[in-house]
Image (cartoon, rainbow, N blue to C red):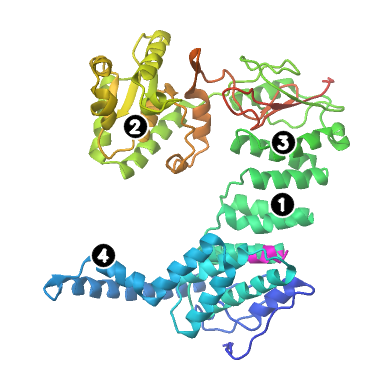
Amino acid sequence: MLLCRSSTFFAPSFNAKTSQNFCSYFTKKTHLLSFFKNSPICCNHSYLFAKHIKDSNFIGAHNLFMKKKATFCNSAISATSQSDEKAVGGNVVSKRLKKKARRDAPEGVLRFKLDMCSKVGDVVEGLRLYDEARRNGVELNQHHYNVMLYLCSQNRGENGSDLKLACKRGFEIFQQMIIDKVPPNEATFTNAARLASVMEDPEMAFDLVKQMKGFGIMPKLRSYGPPLFGFCKKGMVDKAYEVDAHMIESGVVAEEPELSSLLKLSADVNNADKMYELLHRLRTSVRQVMESTVGVIEDWFKSEHAAKIGKGDWDVIKVKEGVVRGGGGWHGQGWLGHGQWRVVRTQMDKKGVCGSCGERLACIDIDPRETENFAISLSKLAFGREVKADFIRFQEWLQQHGPFDAVVDGANVSLINQQTFNFSQLNNVVNRLHDMSPSKKFPLVILHTSRVNGGPAQSPYNKKLLERWKNSGALYATPAGSNDDWYWLYAAVSCKCLLVTNDEMRDHLFQLLGTSFFPRWKEKHQVRLSVSRSGIALHMPPPYSIVIQESENGGWHVPTTTGDDLETPRQWLCATRPVKR
């Protein structure tokens, strides 16, 4: 077995061939996997840590390591539990005291201080704390190492020397983590890949990502950023596409920054087929497109190469069938037409008719099965965060009194442009929705119990309003300690009706939903309000889908984030050209 002598230190050269130097630094003088497998390790550039070993051998060794660790941890927990039951001075040791003991231990103090350094980006102090801890024999765990790797990878330095020093120290720490037999996780590999990216070595960053699966770790989107953006920056087309393929194989969905970089790279090399593929991937994953991405798409359509590609003749029936299968808005049959593209910034009227080409945008259907599955997943999330009995009671109440044509987020509507809770404003909206309702039914008003029983609700006028809604089966008071967001969202989804709120639903709660269906659902169901001196205006969902659309004639419409408010019309990029059959 190879031995790593602590007295010998080989610093990487930063002058030339960075990738090879970095790899030889770690692979020839250290052995990342030697504590997993008792055999010599042969390394090359393709495998940063070690020559690929059989998965079965690795998994068996890794499981053995983890089982031993788990056994040790379970024994420690068991011993701790028994000691907790013993009286100390007549008192049982509380959880608070145990937590305080962990916090005051050298490892806990170091963790707190490093977290503070991470918060403010102080790599110098972080390195000082790390060196001091090692001198004092403090046992460093995975979190300590990951924070240090993060600090070094995020440091940009005031000059090149500071940058190189931070990267050098970062890889030293990475090496020490392996020597100390601290198992790496996704954050470890991602931060190491970022270090490689800072040194402009995307090859090394990609090698790190590819080895994650060997450790039983699934890469995340952030793991692919360093190699993908690095290859795109260097114009290494084939390698960038390889990273993209690896992402798809791993089930990682690229978002707008990644797709935008790939679009720019593909446009630079005039890869029309890849541009077409990426535009459709952008269509499926992003609703409105950032200005930087719109600029890339606009430049492509204006290019000479874009004018040369496209079918002069196409199967009209296949195109129409593709549009029907996709629910409208795209056909996926490739570039249609010939000649120079006419590219303009424009707006849509209330019916979705383009102000430039006169084409009407499609209203893309939402699959009813998707809605049902979304309601089920929503209720599961609510069960995990609300008192289950309370939410089940609400579901039963909804089945008894529903369905509704609209659901109102009572608190949000009452506080729009108001300093205090305004029941009159809420009542105005309720009456408007009642008049608009096909069934002439009151909308469901969701309010927290504190809003129903306290404060302004105690006035005689507001009591009458609440009583009226309650008697009509149109008021539900969410219980104390609950988050009413779960209630009004679930009600609107399960009733397949309108949701009246100005809440853009972008906070952590809604991020938990983790589905592309949610923004599509909001587009079709959310009613927003504006309040002015002339009164309240209800802004109904548009009769068309605000998403990238490809027409049957080969034209494209791309919605931008510019004008994404109630007062300013949204801007669209319209790209069309003469149709030649």
Q: Can you tell which quarter of the image residue 101 is in? A: bottom left
| Closer mark to the observer between disc 4 and disc 3 | 4
Residue picked out by circle 4: 96
- Of residues 231 and 469, the one drawn nearer to the viewer in this rendering: 469
Circles 4 and 3, Cβ within 8 Å, touching? The answer is no
* Structural distance between the alpha carbons of marks 1 and 3: 21 Å
Q: Which mark is residue 48?
A: none
**Which contiguous range is marked in magenta?**
195-201
Q: Is residue 462 left or right of residue 147?
A: left
Q: Could you tell me residue 44's position as x and y percent?
A: 69, 75
Q: Secondary structure at mark 3?
A: helix
Q: Earlier in the sequence, mark 1 or mark 3?
A: 1
* Structural distance between the alpha carbons of marks 4 and 3: 54 Å
Q: Secondary structure at mark 2?
A: helix
In this rendering, is residue 439 above or below 380?
A: above
Q: Can you tell which quarter of the image residue 337 is in? A: top right
In this rendering, is residue 312 above or below 221?
A: above
Circles 2 and 1, Cβ within 8 Å, touching? The answer is no
Residue picked out by circle 2: 487
